[in-house]
Amino acid sequence: MEEIVVCHLARYANDNELSPCLSSLLFKLCMDCSLLDDLKWKEWEWQKALATEENQVDPGVYAMPPFATMEPWAIVSYIIILCLYLMSGVSQDHCSFYLMALTLQHNLPSEATPQNHALSFKTSEIPTTIDTLVSHLKIEPKAKPYMCCQHCFCLYDSDKPIPNVCTFEDDKGEGECREQLRKKKSHMPLHEYVMHDLKDWLARLYTQPGMEELLDHHTHVQPPSDGIMSNIWDAPIVREFCGPDGRPFFGDKGTEGCLIFSINMDGITNPMLT
């Protein structure tokens, strides 16, 4: 079919002395087709990589309260040390020193706690550094740094080999970006982009008390009878949104949870009307 179209175009161009214009047009069409094929191939490779990626996060690590197995004296002490570190700006070395002092105090024998008494809170479970304490209480989110190109903003996974210059190619056919990614002397990244792991964030979100019921509440909300929308779930665009199976995406699907995310939404624009 393509050959027939090209023959007709060539005949028309010869009859009207448009051969140079036709050649230029065909060249541009071929370049565009090549770029589209390249984009399709890259998208296919990206989807294959996502398919093999680990797609599960155990929310159980956040379900257990961090203070559940601690004794009252330890809870109070840790909260005080965390406040000193996170709110008062006390250094890590000083906070770690306080933790070591707590460990020594816990090991000292006393009349209330004889040496042969089986302690419910083992010494080995006491954090001795502030980093260990913060990690134990799961305060900081799970984040991952990416090396970022300052010109095209392409991201490179820090767990994989990264070139010294950016190798990203846009769809304009201008070749690789070739922007420098590392400092010349230290070879450290010129620019990093830190991203919160989405699966880990969702695991934290779902383990909050009452959050799962709140996220599923929209499946039981009826549309407004007077047509006045006061909630994002009143919007037809949300209610009529269908999944890959052609059925409403936000329906009652039992134990399956369906979420919607707003990316870079302009707060001035009414999301219920767009």
Image (cartoon, grey):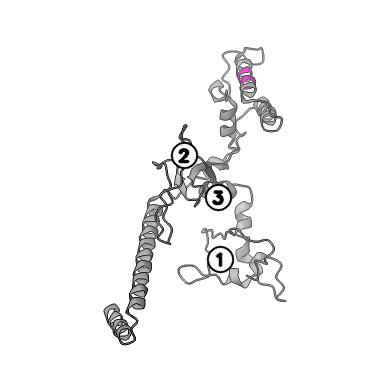
Query: Distance between the Cα atoms at labels 2 and 3?
Result: 33 Å
User: What residue is disc 1 on?
Assistant: 250
Q: Quadrant of residue 79?
A: top right
Residue 73, percent from left and from top:
67, 25
Residue 123, percent from left and from top:
56, 21
Q: Which label was assigned to residue 182?
A: 2
Query: Distance between the Cα atoms at labels 3 and 1?
Result: 18 Å
147 over 27 or under it: above or below: above
Q: Quick one: SS at disc 1?
A: loop
Residue 207, percent from left and from top:
58, 47
Q: Amino acid at mark 2?
A: Arg
Region of the chain picked out in magenta, as a range: 97-101
Q: Amino acid at mark 3?
A: Leu
Q: Nearer the viewer, mark 1 or mark 2?
A: 2
User: What residue is disc 3 on?
Assistant: 202
Number of marks drawn: 3
| 114 vs 149, nearest the viewer | 149
Reading the chain from its start, which is encountered first: label 3 or label 1?
3
The N terminus appears in which quarter of the rendering? bottom left
Residue 100 sits inside the magenta stretch: yes
Reading the chain from its start, which is encountered first: label 1 or label 2?
2
